[in-house]
Image (cartoon, rainbow, N blue to C red):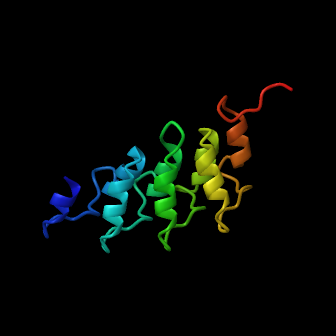
Amino acid sequence: MVKILLGREEVNPDKPNEWAQTLLSCAAWEGYETVAEILLKRGEVSPNKQDELGKTPLTNAAYMGYMGYEGVVKILLGQGEVDPDKLENGSRTPLSHAAQNGHEGVVKTLLGQEAVNPDRLDNGGRTPLWHSARVPNGAVGPS
């Protein structure tokens, strides 16, 4: 369906909804790798566009899913203009979201990026390590 609709000239694939979310952000939120790839082939789609909360497609892919959407994260990181350490409205990075939710593959992928600071503080003075330890998915049990 996406290919059919994108075949129309009057369709704007980067048009935001009422919360300033783009189709790419929504595809990242849902983990739709194929849709993300199709959209990114269009020059007018911005892979770094923020919604009203400051979330980028990368933030959404790192945050969501049972294990994070590692495939979408890799696709987005393949775009030269994507900042893998971008704070959402001064708050948190994709790494801190992935760490909090126990998304090991996404955490490893992000840590493989030179631009990612694994000790970057959020607006509450917390690091990705802090976020990983505060939830059962990331916490190490008693030894």
Q: On the rendered structure, is 30 left or right of 76?
A: left
Residue 54 can be seen, yes or no: no
Q: Nearer the viewer, residue 89 or 56?
A: 56
Q: On the rendered structure, is 80 left or right of 33?
A: right
* Residue 83, image quadrant: bottom right
Q: Residue at x 28, y 50 (%)?
A: 18
Residue 109 can be seen, yes or no: yes
Q: In x, y percent, where is residue 2?
A: 22, 56
Q: On the rendered structure, is 24 left or right of 1?
A: right
Q: Is residue 21 above or below residue 80?
A: above
Which residue is farthest right?
A: 143
Q: In x, y percent, where is residue 131?
A: 68, 41
Q: Residue at x 73, y 45 (%)?
A: 129
Q: Residue at x 73, y 36 (%)?
A: 133
Q: Is residue 43 above or below residue 48?
A: below
User: The C terminus appears in which quarter of the rendering?
Assistant: top right
